[in-house]
Image (cartoon, grey):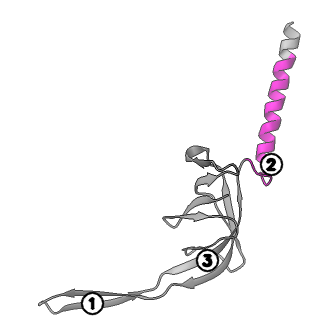
Amino acid sequence: MYAIIETGGKQYSVAPGDEVRVERLDGDVGDRVEFDRVVAVSEQDGRLRTGDDVTAIVSGTISSQGRAKKIHVFKFKRRKMYRRRIGHRQSYTQVRIDSISGPGDDTEDDSGAEAAEDASEASGAEAAEDASEA
């Protein structure tokens, strides 16, 4: 099972156990993070769910915070005596993906159970109305 998440303006393909470097996130090493902007999720049977029906949450643990290797930017215009040299180091957060939870998983929250109870109560009320009409 894998998911495609969006964070920091980029999309990442992740699976449980993966380590991924994303744009800097607030938090310390060992903190848990959740990515709720999930673009697509592959199910156990291999189908890929995309669009509005994706309600999965990807959770992970921050394994490190750091800065990438320095890049040098050199601007130059010939015959104009124009030279500019600057550098840049991008900050990143390395996250270990722990789980991908969706509506069909065992780790589903209680809101789904409440919805199922409401549906069963509604169907029971309709059955009672049918019995009273007969």
Q: Residue furthest top?
A: 134
Q: Amino acid at mark 1?
A: Arg
- Label located before the other in sequence (3 or 2): 3
| Cα distance in 3D space between marks 3 and 2 | 30 Å
Judging by the rendered image, the residue that carries numbered circle 1 is 84
- Mark 2: few/some/many CA within 10 Å (<14, 14-19, 20+): few
Q: Position of residue 99 (x, y in %)?
A: 72, 63
- Residue sitting at 62 percent across and 53 percent down? 41
Q: Quadrant of the C terminus?
A: top right
| Cα distance in 3D space between marks 3 and 1 | 32 Å
Judging by the rendered image, the residue that carries numbered circle 2 is 110
Q: Amino acid at mark 2?
A: Asp
Q: Position of residue 65 (x, y in %)?
A: 61, 82
Write down the region rendered in magenta: 104-128
Above/below status of 81 relative to 108: below
Horizontally, is 30 left or right of 22 in the view? Answer: right
